[in-house]
Image (cartoon, grey):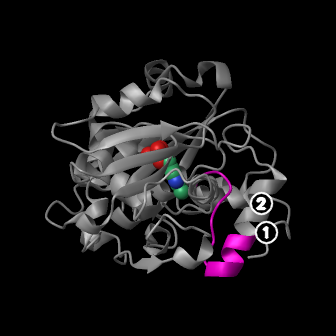
């Protein structure tokens, strides 16, 4: 089923270039000169934000294969993005989902099924052992591209390193901030940031101390300096606090920009706190990466978010 051997994936999936908006007015700061946000959330309705960048070189490799196999949870932006991309490319997709098959699918999983993805549910205990799972499902792996959860891996990092190409005046920024799940996007950002810039990743996960070495292992020298901040996870992955939800509503009210409570809400919350604490030196110029992803918000009760 060699469908599109000569067509660039950029032409198979129609996405828009991300714009930059100034959001300095949303923060109360004496030190910081300006805060800009890169709207990766607007590049595509389904393959939102960083998922496109992390997927693009995997998709390039999948062009002459029969299927893509990938992994994720019930509200995974990556699962939907992969399902949609495979559909656009006219190839099969299989999603290996963490947990027992639910009686009712989450909207995210339902969308993935509607895009033609075959879902295989795997109990949490065995989910970590990828090779075992792949052996069990008995599918011809030579005709498949296997993508790890969230696009994690060198191919994902390579794609994420393209994100900053969309920033025309990259050199004006002193700090670049992004959300961290697997750290794949951040590794790409650190790799492509300028040596004098400082990259701050805000972890959506509680105390994943193993992440820093992961990001570091993806580096090529010279690169920007970086740190991962673990103070703003609000209880852990996909956990939330009333303060977070309140902040997201206020941020949207001030800027018109929606965020999600799993990643970008926590990121902007952290930016606001760090500015208040005078973390940034005088005249800092911040670039915040709005990495997209609205799937998590679909798990919230209607009305909790005012957007
Ligand atoms: C997947 C995702 C992330 C996490 O990216 P990693 O590369 O796994 O760290 C951050 N933000 C959003 C909106 C996402 O969908």
Residue 296 visible within the image = yes
Q: Is mark 2 within 8 Å of ligand 1?
A: no
Disc 1/disc 2 C-alpha distance (Å): 7 Å
In the drawing, what numbered circle is on residue 245?
2
Q: Residue at x 35, y 53 (%)?
A: 55
Bounds of the magenta segment = 250-263
Q: Residue at x 77, y 60 (%)?
A: 245
Q: Who is closer to the viewer here, 78 or 105?
A: 78
Spot occupied by residue 95 in the image (x, y as percentages of width and height): 52, 43
The number of callouts visible is: 2
Q: Residue at x 58, y 36 (%)?
A: 230
> If you read the primary sequence from the N terminus, does the residue marked by circle 1 or circle 2 appear first?
2
Spot occupied by residue 285 in the image (x, y as percentages of width and height): 39, 65
- The C terminus: image quadrant: bottom right
Q: Quadrant of residue 26?
A: bottom right
Q: Depth-wise, is mark 1 or mark 2 nearer the camera?
A: 2
* Residue 251 among those drawn in magenta: yes
- The N terminus: image quadrant: bottom left
Q: Quadrant of residue 88?
A: bottom left
Q: Secondary structure at mark 1?
A: loop
Q: Secondary structure at mark 2?
A: helix
Residue occupied by mark 1 = 305
Above or below, comparing residue 114 to residue 257 in the picture: above
Q: Mark 1 near mark 2, Cβ–Cβ under 8 Å?
A: yes
Question: From the viewer's perspective, is 211 left or right of 10?
Answer: right
């Amino acid at each position: 089923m060699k469908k599109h051997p000569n067509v660039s994936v950029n032409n198979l999936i129609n996405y828009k270039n991300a714009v930059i908006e100034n959001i300095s007015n949303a923060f109360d700061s004496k030190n910081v000169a300006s805060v800009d946000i890169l709207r990766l959330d607007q590049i595509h309705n389904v393959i939102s934000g960083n998922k496109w960048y992390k997927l693009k070189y995997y998709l390039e490799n999948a062009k002459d294969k029969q299927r893509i196999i990938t992994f994720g949870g019930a509200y995974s932006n990556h699962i939907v993005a992969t399902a949609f991309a495979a559909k656009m490319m006219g190839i099969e997709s299989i999603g290996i989902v963490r947990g027992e098959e639910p009686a009712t699918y989450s909207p995210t999983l339902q969308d993935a099924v509607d895009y033609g993805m075959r879902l295989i549910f795997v109990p949490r205990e065995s989910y970590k052992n990828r090779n075992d799972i792949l052996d069990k499902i008995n599918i011809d792996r030579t005709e498949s591209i296997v993508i790890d959860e969230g696009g994690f891996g060198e191919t994902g990092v390579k794609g994420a390193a393209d994100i900053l190409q969309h920033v025309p005046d990259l050199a004006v920024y002193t700090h670049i901030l992004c959300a961290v799940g697997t750290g794949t996007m951040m590794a790409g950002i650190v790799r492509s940031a300028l040596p004098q810039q400082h990259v701050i990743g805000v972890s959506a996960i509680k105390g994943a101390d193993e992440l820093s070495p992961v990001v570091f292992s993806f580096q090529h020298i010279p690169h920007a300096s970086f740190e991962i901040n673990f103070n703003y996870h609000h209880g852990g992955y996909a956990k939330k606090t009333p303060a977070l939800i309140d902040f997201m509503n206020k941020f949207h009210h001030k800027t018109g920009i929606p965020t999600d409570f799993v990643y970008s809400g926590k990121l902007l919350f952290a930016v606001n706190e760090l500015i208040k604490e005078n973390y940034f030196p005088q005249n800092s110029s911040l670039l915040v990466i709005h990495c997209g992803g609205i799937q998590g918000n679909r798990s919230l009760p209607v009305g909790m978010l005012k957007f």
